[in-house]
Amino acid sequence: AQSDAAKVLADRFANGEAVVEIDPSAIDASFVPDRMPGSDEDHAALVTSIADTGQLVPVLLRPHPQDPTRFQTAYGHRRIRALSELRKPVRAIIRKMTDEELVIAQGKENGERRDLSFIERSNYAVALEARDFKREVIGAALSVDKTELSRLISVGRSIPKRLIDAIGPAPKTGRRRWMELEELLKSRADSE
């Protein structure tokens, strides 16, 4: 029979409270990317920090839904990338999560740590909507109200992806500038 202490530990692990070490090569990214390439200007500093002091905050993973030998990232992509480059194991909490729970955790973490730029949030909202997530889930993932969510999705749909990619994450460009570009493109299309 399992001792009470062992049962408590097993329950904690099953509920995602235990921190384990995972080889970064067994970890896949989230199924919906939230950052654009080039949006991580602080990567070298993060690698140096982890090399000096170790990984202080665990990442959140779930068992991969299609491959039981792998894991999928809810949050901690930057730390996983840094640890992979350092050839060190990733300290992680493993939690069973639905797709909805994963995208909400992913969005909340970004809101609480290193904010995504407006256009990255816009792209993320459009990508989630394209995967048939309900607007309530998308709003919860991004911690925005219905009005702001409508703005994010409107901009993400109106500005061509190739133009967004050419501009990049533009962390200092706020909602107003992106909405001005959206209006400019709409008026240009109307006049043609």
Image (tube, grey):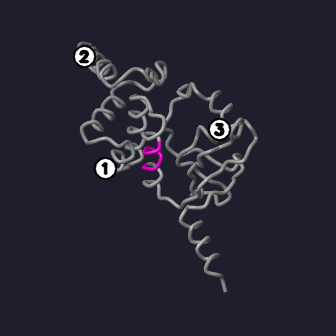
Q: Quadrant of the N terminus?
A: bottom right
Circle 1 sits on which residue? 136
Looking at the image, is mark 1 or mark 3 earlier in the sequence?
3
Looking at the image, is mark 2 or mark 1 earlier in the sequence?
1
Cα separation, mark 1 vs mark 3, equals 31 Å
Cα separation, mark 3 vs mark 2, equals 42 Å
Q: Which mark is residue 187?
A: 2
- Based on the displayed image, in which of its 4 quarters is residue 48 positioned? top right
Residue 7 lies, in percent from the top left, at: 61, 77
Magenta stretch secondary structure, dominant: helix
Q: Residue at x 38, y 33 (%)?
A: 122
Q: Residue furthest bottom?
A: 1
Q: Under tag 2, what secondary structure?
A: helix
Residue 112 lies, in percent from the top left, at: 44, 41
Q: Are marks 2 and 1 in contact (CB under 8 Å)?
A: no
Q: Residue at x 33, y 28 (%)?
A: 155
Which of discs 2 and 1 lies nearer the camera? The answer is 1
Q: Which mark is residue 37?
A: none
Please state the extent of the stretch shown in magenta in the rendering: 104-109
Disc 2 marks a residue whose amino acid type is: Ser
Disc 3 marks a residue whose amino acid type is: Arg
Circle 3 sits on which residue? 81
Q: Residue at x 67, y 37 (%)?
A: 50
**Residue 186 drawn above or below residue 144:** above
User: In the drawing, does residue 182 fall left or right of residue 30?
Assistant: left
Q: Residue at x 38, y 42 (%)?
A: 142
Residue 57 lies, in percent from the top left, at: 59, 46
User: In the drawing, does residue 76 fall left or right of residue 114?
Assistant: right
Q: Are marks 3 and 2 in contact (CB under 8 Å)?
A: no
Residue 178 lies, in percent from the top left, at: 34, 22
Q: Under tag 3, what secondary structure?
A: helix
